[in-house]
Amino acid sequence: MQYHFEDFVLDPDRRELAHGPETIATGPQVLDLLIYLVQNRERVVTKDNLIDIVWGGRIVSESTLTSHINAVRRAVGDTGDEQRLVRTIARKGYRFVGDVKETAAPEIAASEGAEAAQPEGTGLPVPDRPSIAVLPFLNLSGDPSQDYFVDGVVDDIISALSRMRWLFVIARNSSFTYKGRAVDVKQVGRELGVRYVLEGSVRKAANRVRITGQLVDALAGANLWSERFESALDDLFELQDEMAASIVGALAPHLETAEIERARRKPTESLDAYDYYLRGMWKFRQVSRSAIDEAMPMFYEAIQRDPEFASAYAMAAWCHSWRKLSRWLTDLEREIAEGTRLARRAVQLGQDDAVALAASAHALAHLSRDLDSGIALLDRALVLDPNLAAGWYLGGFLRIWRGEPDDAIGRIARGMRLSPLGPDMQRMEVGTAMAHLLAGRPDDALSWAEKASRHMSDHAFPISILAACYTRAGRRDEAKLVTQQLCRLDPALRLSNLDEWLPFRRPQDLDNFADALREAGLPK
């Protein structure tokens, strides 16, 4: 569908605004605003409507919204004084008031860049962050009386996904209009304005229940992920909660990975704040020093393009704290101050953003040694999103430093359960090893430390834990060899500066770790 007004042609499928033979250059959010105003021209569009559709519900300032409305007016030759096409309705919102004629759009040739186009037809524009609809699952039990259980599982999944601030989730009332209907996921994507669709089925037999789910890219029609979950049928409602948590925990990393790949394929000149954030996440996940160094400027670029993007501030702060934990800082005082500033700004902006709160909490605890505030922020993040794997394992790390290793092990294990194949597994291995070591279980600690050190062989932290574990397990020759590796990685590391490096609260925990490394041969 194309929209003609005055001498302009707006083509949502091609994502183009043309004035005669000339294509008007606009930013992606400006174009989304214009498309939404034109498609909803019969009514006044509220500011909340625009924020939900264009910014996916993310908190934006009044000035950001106003500047984008002004950019829409400039693109169509309008002004705030004239308001010939885009009218401000006082205390209500905005309305497109131009005369519009609709025509069928010419066929769009398939190409590699077609995924950036809006879906065919007159659907809603896709938000600029991951968006998903969870369809009613099929009841394969052959017993209609079991529909309540099947629908309950889907309700729990929708509720859990809705707690993820970075994810735009279609409400149950809209998703359940497709109940009992054969659907085409591409059509669902067009009608609901989402990029992803989750569909599945539930089968109950005897004393067991099996749930299958698959994630589909609604634009391309491609299956991105599928999984089967099975359990004994004991406590029905507890099982619903467990199944929903398992599905969401397994699904979330795949959603983020799919979005990262989408952002990586976009040409550089088309990137917006969220695309830079996703590219930064792709680098951050690689853990290496060079990758963290490349991730940081991408998060800063995201902040530059959207100064109220809480998660971008938080991830930039996490880069600084990761550099501190890995002993890569070249200007300790400056980077600690900068990382702390970023984390505090993220907390200010992201009071209801679980990802921003979790990453900021980790950064503040390591950079400013404020463990109690960090733990309080992580607890709030988990209230907002109980299925956030990072919230659980980062909370585990802070309990390690506060002297609560057994609590830490339980929290990290919960993170592993929620994200068993996620990119943070190696970090969780490190935390589990350290917690077992401080709890006086060197053999358990060693098995985890060996895994972690294989995955992070160029990081001082897991290598130091491995050396301490070998010492406590009575394997001193191996401890000395690993300590030699540690000294090659970080020639400046000494027993005397361990306290500056790791934020132990209890002196006995620091002494325990230092004594093990002293026996392993770390210099004073």
Image: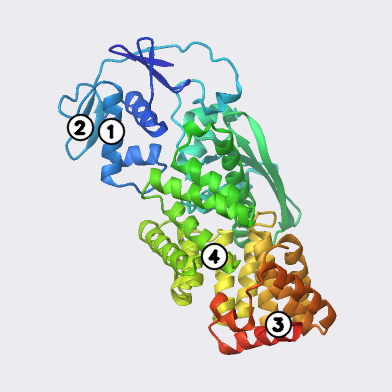
**Above or below for 82 versus 372:** above
Question: Which residue is under mark 4?
Answer: 329
Residue type at the position of mark 4: Leu
Callout 2: 10 Å neighbours few (<14), some, many (20+)?
some
Residue 305 x, y percent position in the rendering = 39, 43
* Screen quadrant of the N terminus: top left
Residue 500 x, y percent position in the rendering = 54, 78
Callout 1: 10 Å neighbours few (<14), some, many (20+)?
many
Q: Residue at x 52, y 28 (%)?
A: 116
Tell me how far mark 2 sits from mark 4, CA to CA: 50 Å
Is residue 46 visible in the rendered image? The answer is no
Q: Quadrant of residue 346?
A: bottom left
Callout 4: 10 Å neighbours few (<14), some, many (20+)?
some
Residue type at the position of mark 1: Ile
Question: Quick one: label 1 or label 2, which is nearer the N terminus?
Answer: 1
| Callouts 1 and 2 close, C-beta under 8 Å | yes
Is residue 321 visible in the rendered image? The answer is yes
**Above or below for 145 versus 126:** below
Q: Say whether residue 1 is left or right of residue 421.
A: left
Question: Quick one: label 2 or label 4, which is nearer the N terminus?
Answer: 2
Assign a secondary structure to mark 3: helix
Question: Quick one: label 1 or label 4, which is nearer the N terminus?
Answer: 1
Question: Quick one: label 1 or label 3, which is nearer the N terminus?
Answer: 1
Tell me how far mark 3 sits from mark 4, CA to CA: 22 Å
Tell me how far mark 1 sits from mark 3, CA to CA: 61 Å
In depth, the one of 6 and 235 nearer the eye is 6
Question: Which residue is under mark 3?
Answer: 517
Tell me how far mark 2 sits from mark 3, CA to CA: 68 Å
Question: Which residue is under mark 1?
Answer: 69
